Amino acid sequence: MTYRIYILDHRFQVLESQDFEGRDDLSALDKGNSLSRDNPVEIWQRDRFVACIGMDGEGAPSQSFMSLSLRNLALAA
């Protein structure tokens, strides 16, 4: 499946986007996690929202965004 990741600035404005091929939403989340070290990211599969991964004060993905992402995956299954 084709996904697009939007890399966002601290005001959640798009800095850049990247298209990539992934097997499923979990692989897209892995890719998003690897890109969210310095900036929040949004992950989309065509016009379907997959996840938003933010940052906490230490540069790690925020738990609230990760919980939302995992809940969306559970609902989609």
Image (cartoon, grey):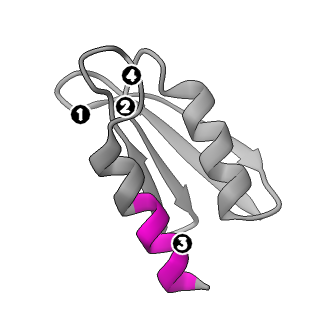
For the residues labelled 4 and 3, say whether their Cβ atoms are less than 8 Å apart. no
* First-in-chain label (4 vs 1): 1
Q: Name the residue under label 3.
A: 73
Q: Is mark 2 on a helix, strand or loop?
A: loop
Q: Where does the magenta region start and end? A: 69-76
Q: Position of residue 2 (x, y in %)?
A: 73, 59
Q: What element carries label 1?
A: loop
Gap in angstroms between the C-alphas marked 1 and 3? 23 Å
Residue 39's tag is 4
Q: Tell me which residue sits at (52%, 58%) in the image.
A: 44
Q: Tell me which residue sits at (57%, 39%) in the image.
A: 32
Q: Tell me which residue sits at (23%, 33%) in the image.
A: 12
Q: What residue type is labelled 4?
A: Asn
Q: Is mark 4 on a helix, strand or loop?
A: loop
For the residues labelled 1 and 3, say whether their Cβ atoms are less than 8 Å apart. no
Q: Mark 2 points at which residue?
A: 40
Decide if residue 52 is on the left or right side of residue 9: right
Gap in angstroms between the C-alphas marked 2 and 4? 4 Å
Q: Tell me which residue sits at (32%, 28%) in the image.
A: 55
Q: What residue type is labelled 2?
A: Pro
* First-in-chain label (1 vs 3): 1
Q: What residue type is labelled 3?
A: Leu
Decide: few, some or many residues near mark 3? Use Cα within 10 Å; few <14, some 14-19, many ≥20: some
For the residues labelled 4 and 1, say whether their Cβ atoms are less than 8 Å apart. no
For the residues labelled 1 and 2, say whether their Cβ atoms are less than 8 Å apart. yes
User: Which of pointers 4 and 3 indicates the residue nearer the eye?
Assistant: 3
Residue 12's tag is 1
**29 to 8, vertically: above or below:** below
